[in-house]
Amino acid sequence: MTDYPVERGLLRRIDGWIAPQESDGLYAWLLHELAWHEESIRLFGCQVKVPRLVAWYGNEGASYRYSGVDHHPLPWTPCLLSLKQRLEAYCGRRFNSVLANHYRTGQDSMGWHSDDEPELGSEPWIASLSFGAERRFKLRHRSRPGTLDIPLGNGSLLLMGGALQQDYQHCVPKTRVAVAGRINLTFRLIRPGCDPVRPD
């Protein structure tokens, strides 16, 4: 277990939270069974393709808007529901949705952002599971220089909580190194009563 030095929040990595053999099996299942799709977002007035595949699952009504796109959840699969329940027991937190990202190659990525949408509340807790190839997770403070590099390997768990999303941004950058696929599941709690459809 590694706790990283962040202010007003929690950033904790647990390597091997899921054992290698089970992680390999989960990667194969997620790859073939989730409803992956390619999204486009509006960036600087233009529609551009998101450089990864995504899927959104959760409780009925756990809709979520980010990057100008509304996401309405598909019903939980037994596998995703089981992972959610394991995480809730471990974290002592409740989750009602999960965003899945499939990074097919090292050229798939996620740009700098914070998970600070109103639907998540002011201090959201996010539990992030990684399967497949190791990728680099980068963190930077909103107003100070410097970045923190965190390797996320097969079966690792990254917990983010407190005011972390208020103070920091994170990304998964492209890499020129030849890497196999990676699937990331980020479990969240969408707050009821928040309207995900709003002006950008």
Image: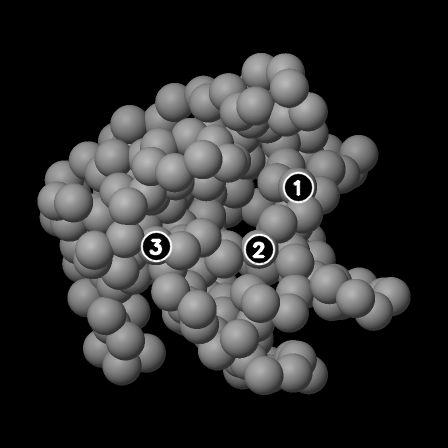
* 50 displayed left or right of 151: left
Q: Amino acid at mark 1?
A: Gly
* 151 displayed left or right of 100: right
Classify mark 3: helix, strand or loop.
helix
In this view, the residue farthest toward the front is 199
Q: Residues within 10 Å of mark 3 (few under 14, many from 20)?
A: many
Is residue 60 something one can see in this rendering? yes
What is the CA distance from the residue labelled 2 to the residue labelled 3? 13 Å
Q: Nearer the viewer, mark 1 or mark 2?
A: 2
Quadrant hosting residue 5: bottom right
Residue at horizontal 76 percent and vertical 38 percent from the top: 175
Q: Nearer the viewer, residue 40 or 44?
A: 44
Q: Nearer the viewer, mark 1 or mark 3?
A: 3
Residue 141 in the image, given as x and y percentages of width and height: 74, 67
The residue to which callout 2 is attached is 114
The numbered dot on residue 111 is 1
In this view, the residue farthest toward the top is 47
The numbered dot on residue 119 is 3
What is the CA distance from the residue labelled 1 to the residue labelled 2? 10 Å
Q: Amino acid at mark 3?
A: Glu
Residue at horizontal 62 percent and vertical 31 percent from the top: 108
Classify mark 1: helix, strand or loop.
strand
Residue at horizontal 70 percent and vertical 57 percent from the top: 138
Q: Earlier in the sequence, mark 2 or mark 3?
A: 2
Q: Quadrant of the N terminus?
A: bottom right
Q: Nearer the viewer, residue 54 or 118?
A: 118
Residue 90 in the image, given as x and y percentages of width and height: 29, 79
